[in-house]
Image (cartoon, rainbow, N blue to C red):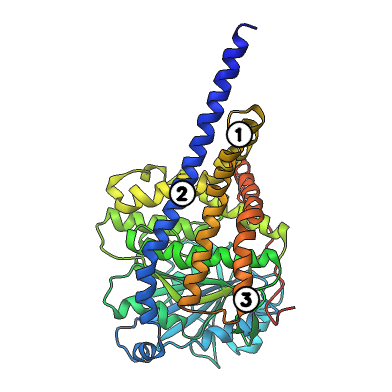
Amino acid sequence: MIGSPMLLAFFHRFLWWADHGVLFYFLALNSFYAMLLILSIPELWRHWRLADDEHLSRLITSEALPALSLLVPAYNEEVTITASVLSFLTLEYPKFEVILINDGSKDGTMDVLLSEFDLYEVPPAYPRVLGSQRVRAVYRSRRHSRLIVLDKENGGKADSLNAGINAARHEYVVAVDADTLIEPDALLRLARPFVLGTSVAAVGGTLRVANGCVVKMGRVVDARVAPVWLSGCQVVEYLRAFLFGRLGWNTIGGSLIISGAFGLFRREYLLAIGGYKTGNVTEDMDLVVRLQRYLYENNIKAEMPFIPDPVAWTEVPPQIHVLARQRERWHRGLIGTMITHRDLLFNRKYGAMGMVAIPYFFFGEMLAPLIELFGYVITVLALALGAVDLRFALLLLVCAIGYGSLLTVWAIVLEDLSFRRYRRRGDLARLLLFAFIEGLGFRQLTVWFRLQAFWKYLRGSDSWGVMTRQGFGAPK
């Protein structure tokens, strides 16, 4: 009994310090986001000036543009594969090939390809440098000289990309998803760093949400914001992540993410690091970290910039249970990547990657759901026991949620002032509404999904889960 008041006082003090620690964490994290926003503004202005049609017309005749190999892994895409392949074959770019990798589809994907593109089998005249599941046959098209089809045994996306890298004839490869809708001029825009004389190891483009958009013949012809809150929140989330999140890293250096659905890489470097790592549920981030390591360790001065105007459209999960699988998998992959490369943390040998990027993703992304949950719990306890007052709890809420929502609004403003993909006032109003719903409601939902990733990682799970899609078309 004598120690009870002392124990209670200690507990009060602990709650007070813990709550203030969480407050400082959210202030620091959101202030870092704000810094990325500030750094992105001159970058956005520079790319916006270079994004007009006059510059594109110069690009298409430029001899500085390298030949590209598009790598398109496909699994059970029977319904949409014809439109997808045609959309890739008709992209505006002077010299490229499309390598479609049929990853052991169990439906009629291969039959459709054989029929629609008049495929004929050819000898596999390329070295098998990277390991992959057995390639059963290689085909070319009598109708489209740019098209090559690899029919292989199932091994997953990373395995399929490795098979595609082996077959690629050109110096640079572009990894895309079979169900990604690439804008016709996106490859020209993606290749801009080559014209500017930049030594390039990789280039990242922008992903936008196709849910709610009008799609015809594999092209987004009318960009719209879906009125459904789940899809709408992901629209503003993608805007924030790509428009200033990744653009701000151009100035800092050391970016660790190039989307697996739309990214360009120098083939020589991919071969040097052993290609994509199979068995990893976020093979794109793992590849970029290993590529950055390779550049630092071999003192290669090659950049990995993000370009905001090359756009590919993707369908995001329209249902909560599908979103749950996706976000859990993404975070489990992040945990695996951070643990595998933990020796980079605050390692000055690796420059901006070791001193800024890895610490940010370790503390600001990987541990964020744990700290956020901890903050909610101790704040409720501290309020109940009188360790903090209501004003402090509201301040914590503003820093954790309001600060982030304000940054999202600024991302929407930047979008409206620059590229303006969404031209209707109603769509702009929806974006602003979803910016606040995303901060209060959607974010807490994804925190719960990401928390589950820690348990699955400890259990050694490497499952992807079923990512069901509704398909593209006119908004319902």
Mark 1 highlights which residue? 378
Work out which quarter of the rendered image holds the N terminus and state it: top right
Location of residue 26 with respect to 80 vertically, above or below: above
Q: Which mark is on residue 29?
A: 2
**Residue 198 seen anywhere in this rendered image of the structure:** yes
Mark 1: secondary structure: helix
Mark 2: secondary structure: helix
Residue farthest along the top direction in this orientation: 2
Q: Residue at x 44, y 81 (%)?
A: 187
Amino acid bearing label 2: Leu
Q: Residue at x 32, y 44 (%)?
A: 347
Location of residue 445 with respect to 224 vertically, above or below: above
Left or right position of 362 against 191: right
Q: Give the percent coordinates (x, y) of residue 182.
A: 53, 79
Q: Residue at x 69, y 81 (%)?
A: 473
State the separation of the CA atoms marked 1 and 2. 19 Å
Q: Give the percent coordinates (x, y) of residue 253.
A: 33, 59
Q: Residue at x 64, y 89 (%)?
A: 116
Q: Give the percent coordinates (x, y) of residue 329.
A: 60, 53
Amino acid bearing label 1: Ile
- Which is nearer the eye, 377 or 120? 377
Could you say which quadrant of the image residue 456 lies in?
Answer: top right
State the separation of the CA atoms marked 1 and 3. 38 Å
Amino acid bearing label 3: Asp
Crowd tier of the residue under label 3, counting other residues whose Cα lies within 10 Å: few below 14, some 14–19, many 20 or above: some
Q: Give the percent coordinates (x, y) of residue 82.
A: 64, 84
Question: Which badge, 1 or 3, is on the more N-terminal residue?
Answer: 1
**Residue 270 seen anywhere in this rendered image of the structure:** no
Mark 3 highlights which residue? 427
Question: Which badge, 3 or 2, is on the more N-terminal residue?
Answer: 2
